[in-house]
Amino acid sequence: MSDIPVPRDIPLPLPASEPVLVTVLIVFFLMHIAFVNFMVGGTFMTLWYQLRGLKEKRYDALAHEIAGTITANKSIAVVLGVGPLLAINTLYTVYFYTANALTGTFWISIIPLVIVAFVLTYIHKYLWKQMETWKVFHIGLIATVSLIFSFIPLIFLTNVNLMLFPEKWGTVQGFFSALALPNVMPRYAHFILACPAMAGLLIVWLFRRRDDADIASIGFTREELVRKGYQWAFWPTAAQFIIGPLALITLPPIQNLQSTVLGVFALSILVSLWMSRLMFVEMRRPAETIGKSFASICILMLVIVVLMGAGRHIYREAAVGPHRELVRSKTKEYMEKVGAANKALTPDGAAGAPQ
Amino acid sequence: MDFPIFHLDILGNRWLIATIAIIHVLVNHGLAVGMMPLVAAMEWYGQKKGDSRWDALAYRILFVSFLVTTTVGALTGVGIWLSVSLVNPYSIGSLIRVFFWAWFTEWLVFITEVCLILAYTLSWKKWSARGPEYKTKHIKLGFALGFFSWVTMAIIVAILGFMMDPGNWLADRSFWTGVMNPLYLPQLAFRTPLAASLAGTVAMFLILFFTKKDGFRLEALRSVGLWTLFFAPFILITGWWYYSSVPEAMKDNLGVSLGTLQFADWQDKFLRIALFTVVTILGVVQVAIWRPHRLPKIALIVPFASILWMTGHFERVREFIRKPYIIGQYMYANGLRAEDYALLQRDGVLAYATYSNPLSEDEQSGLPEGLTPAEQAALLVEIQQGKDVFMDTCSRCHTSHGVNGMSVHLQRMFGDQQWTPELTAGYIENMHYAQPFMPPFPGNKEELWLLGVYLEHLQHNKATIPGSQSAGVIVNRPPQ
Ligand code: HEM
């Protein structure tokens, strides 16, 4: 027990009631992560189609279309990350700062990494025509972006994972040892699979109502494009039925609330089954009716995302809850001592100026 | 104390924050706050004169600004946070609790700003093609964008101002008294023309790339030159206002006469730099206006660099006002609150430290010759404790042997004589009198001596101190 650190919290009141902060955290985090999914998934797809475009020109045109979405999504993704960052700073001050400090070099390298990736996506997008003759280099750019975008989530996941386990804080030595904690990799796989799935839906949305001339200029039929979107969405989602439970099982066990967490995730598995079935049906529909269930699929996906967000939060609360009580009482005890010490120095009780 | 200590032992922690912050201020002032109104004005001017070359030029400058602000600009903004929360989590954690809603509002304004810049840039060609009515709307969009960029800055300045001088916040702890501190308006007033002329010099630089050597280049340089010149005197006037408000804000901290001396020094230097800056702006802009074909690109770097230099020097005023504090009168730069001192100076900081910072292999070498293994072990225990005192109370500002390094200072002060605790402890006990930047030593007598033992060890051990980001921490057992 004595190896579990119990630090003190910052002795100022929270700026708003806890439910308000939690709402800010969850709502904006989910929006953030959705756009991160679009951005990362879109990058993977662009790379893939550009590679195929080496043999068959029209894939290159398709890649160009998808590349156009990355830069807009990336601006939104980053901007939407700031709200949750504020909230997590207040709600989980001790946990978050500790995890940051223990992985500091990598944590701060998020900034240059994201800058480089973003600049490269701009170059890749805006110099598409000019780089027509340097295709390998051009593809190298988006490949580099894909690599960077695959690495950044690892940094985030390592941090949000490490913050849950005060008992590990004394044993971790640097980023890689925090990365090696049991739950990080399954969660990472879970996230990475979600990227093409979400971006696949984005593709369906993008081409379902595009005007005919635009579609024709790419060189595929609308039906083909929509079907491709669904394929990107369906197969990774199918894999989630293995990875998802794995991520759940590897979560370190916590004392209470296990059943609530299980319930939420079980429910989300049911909804996912339903959604996957719809996707599967859509994929096999003929040109006239393909896309008919798109709205339902999106709603189901939204439900799943919300359930994931909720489950994740309930688990986090359960994991840090007891420890947070210890932190609270330690902080209170400390502040009482501070008060007494100041009183002893200046009998009227005002905070004494040091020396 | 309560959080593992992130530490950069070569360049120092402040370097990390400063680098990110300087880049951010540059991009933010030069390419957003000052540039967006300038671009909108250029677009408007093009429409008024019916000259499409203005329009094309404005678009290109906007496009460059767009690329840089949405990458480097946005990310360094987040980077300031991340770096401060690594280096001084206590201060940012406290500030966020006071300013949550200000930051939240700032964030909403920032989202608006990003949407507007996306809309403004991406709709430029389409809306321009749709006829004058849409063009007018587009120009209004540009000015709206300029306004929101300025509002973002206005909110952030409130927070910066608060850190320098919390005003009445200490007494009533409310959000609005925190915001409305005495330096707020002067600082905002100063940054506004500064941003405008910075943007002017950047735009002139870009004009040299984006125009041919013809009459239009001359016209463009002249007009943007006038914009830059127009704001230059306001930099001086508002700069003067800002800095004459400083002594008022400093008066609580003026106990130390050395601080006053250093401030006077700073003031002298500032006057000279400001004069130099204004003269270079005047000079280069004159050339740009009257002899534009003689103007080499490199020449525009000069006013740009001098504005930068001046801004940088000016920003240091914060240190003078805050002096040993990171949040004026409330929290010292070592992350400890003024209120904590009574307790810590009595019981010691180690009694309340959650973590210890393990000595690495390299840090354990260089012990005096001829000690028995038992004596060595005992000495290492003391060195470990001394190191923890150092990390908890000095490491936010000092390194061991790097920038602002302990051994550098001690070498200068005591030379090659043995840096014994007897020698150093006396200085440290009174260091806040000797160096007004430094907070008083927060620990007790015994810790003063332990710190001295550690400093003596540094004379014989040149290893760098690994931060918690690589070496991790040891959890201290709570006292029974
Ligand atoms: C630089 C701007 C960004 C900010 C301010 C930001 C903010 C955040 C915050 C606060 C969280 C934690 C939320 C929580 O645990 O409740 C988070 C999680 C995450 N972010 Fe971001 N983020 C940014 C950029 C990115 C980028 C560029 C990527 C990917 C390439 C990314 C991927 C992730 C992932 C994978 C998670 C963890 C998801 C999970 O826990 O399942 N973020 N981000």
Image: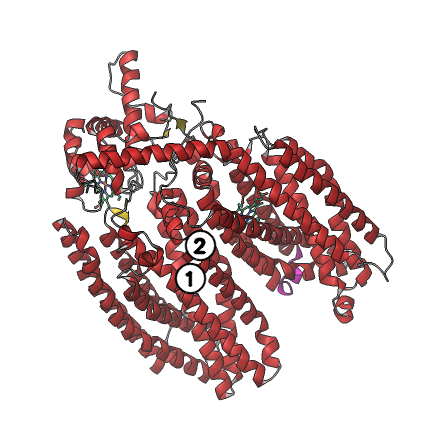
Which amino acid, mark 2? Thr
Report whether B410 appears left or right of B201: left
Q: Secondary structure at mark 2?
A: helix
The residue positioned 59% from the left and 73% from the top of the image is B123
List the single residue furthest toward the left: B257
Report whether B264 appears left or right of B21: left
The residue positioned 51% from the left and 72% from the top of the image is B60
Q: Which residue is mark 2?
A: B76
Q: Quadrant of the N terminus of chain B?
A: top left
Is residue A49 something that shows in the picture? no
List the single residue furthest toward the front: A348
Find residue A102 and report its horizontal and vertical position in percent. 45, 36
Q: CA distance from mark 1 to mark 2?
A: 9 Å
Residue range (magenta): A128-135
In this rendered view, identify the residue nearer to me: B330 or B289: B330
Seen in the picture, residue A134 relative to B198 is either above or below; the reply is above
In this rendered view, identify the residue nearer to me: A23 or B239: A23
Q: In the rendered image, which quarter is residue A119 located in?
A: bottom right
Cβ atoms under marks 1 and 2 closer than 8 Å: yes
- Mark 1, chain letter? B
Report whether A89 appears left or right of B169: right
Seen in the picture, residue B247 relative to B420 is either above or below; the reply is below
Number of marks in the image?
2
Dot 1, how many residues are within 10 Å of its Cα: few (below 14), some (14-19), or many (20+)?
many
Residue under disc 1 on the same chain as residue under disc 2: yes
Q: Quadrant of the C terminus of chain B?
A: top left
User: Residue A130 magenta-drawn?
Assistant: yes
The tag earlier along the polypeptide, 1 or 2, is 1
Q: Which residue is mark 1?
A: B27
Is residue B381 something that shows in the picture? yes
User: Residue B5 magenta-drawn?
Assistant: no
